[in-house]
Image (cartoon, grey):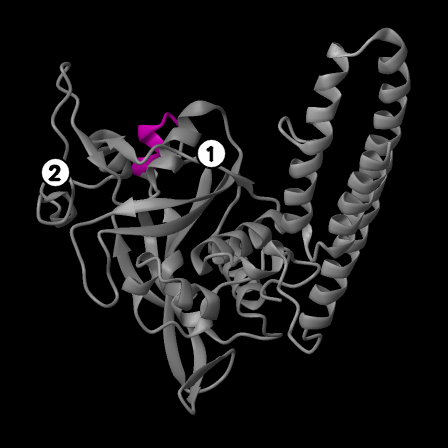
Amino acid sequence: MADLDRLKAEVLAEIEAAGDEPALEVVRVSALGKKGRISELMKSLGAMSPEDRKSAGAALNEVKDAVSAALETRKGALKNAALDARLSAERLDVTLPVLQAPELSGRIHPISQVMDEILSIFAGMGFTLAEGPDIETDENNFTALNIPADHPARQMHDTFYLERAADGTQYVLRTHTSPVQIRTMRAGPPPYRIVAPGRTYRCDSDQTHTPMFHQVEALVIDRGIHMGHLKGTIEAFARAFFEVPQVKMRFRPSHFPFTEPSAEVDIGCKREKGEILFGAGEDWLEIMGCGMVHPNVLRYVGLDPQEWQGFALGMGIDRIAMLKYGIPDLRAFFESDLRWLKHFGFLGIDMPSAYGGLSR
């Protein structure tokens, strides 16, 4: 028994002297491991008589329990001491700015923003969204829109032609969103009041042109539609989009195969300190083309131009985004530069609306 008391005292002293958890683990293994001092004594119980085994076993279990309790106590004390040391050494700089949440750090691309602005304005005027495929038939893209076979727009230097289908149908990457008008008028009877945004394609690339760009067109077909309705619609759109109370406009005669009469629309502006101020001034900026739908287009989709009239307008989304937000180079829209997007992009939580404001 004296040997057990001495062993107990030695192990408890070693436990108390352990300076960290690894050292404490060494003490535990030396005492209670498979080949530890207490474990070896427990193995010797099998060679004793029943009477001796009973008394020796009780004494060994008492020592083992005391050592195990001391190990747990010392382990908890060492953990607390390590935590206190870490807390004393580490410092949190509460002056650092809080990281932005994902919904505040992300940005909406200016093209997506401007497209949403346009749709919000036209939705407020009762227009509905219409869409069509990027790959169109030559018929929908040109013929149905009164574009003659020898028109320059149909030449290969301006249009991306695809291989003919097995049935001989010629497909192209649409050069404008006007085919959506044809698809809409063929899909059901008038009246129509639609706005059609989307990607378009032409063989061109420089500071103000890219092979793929974005357009939006609006179409109204009803009885008794005239140029006054067209002018009022464009004026309401320009005031809302450029966010000015009044806008000075002029309509210059032009020519488009699918409208007659046709016009280019300019709005008044003033250039000041490198910025463009819209709504007033002596300078002019072209923003869109427009006109009354050509009777031949109406006839092609089975409508009587004596009964139905309408107007169409179209503009480049990329171009008016550049004008409104002062973006100098169209090619930057497609370069995936996060620094550029951080500068020109918009917060995703600020959805444009006619009521709450467009470019908040």
Q: Nearer the viewer, mark 2 or mark 1?
A: 2
Please state the horizontal and vertical placement of residue 39, each as a whole percent of the image: 71, 26
Whole-Å distance between the Cαs marked 2 and 1?
28 Å
Please state the horizontal and vertical placement of residue 266, each as a whole percent of the image: 39, 71
| Residue beneath the point at 74% across and 56% down | 17
What range is drawn magenta here?
A: 296-303
Prevailing SS of the magenta stretch = helix
Check residue 106 in the rendering and tell me which mark sits there, or answer none.
Answer: none
Q: Quadrant of residue 7?
A: top right
Asked if the stretch drawn in magenta spans residue 333, the answer is no
Q: Residue furthest bottom?
A: 273
**Which structural element holds mark 1?**
loop
Which is nearer the eye, 157 or 138? 157
Check residue 307 in the rendering and tell me which mark sits there, or answer none.
Answer: 1
| Contact (Cβ within 8 Å) of mark 2 with mark 1 | no
Q: Would residue 175 be found to the left or right of residue 230 on screen? A: left
**Which structural element holds mark 2?**
loop
Q: Amino acid at mark 1?
A: Glu
Q: Would residue 44 be found to the left or right of residue 188 on screen? A: right
| Residue beneath the point at 63% across and 44% down | 26
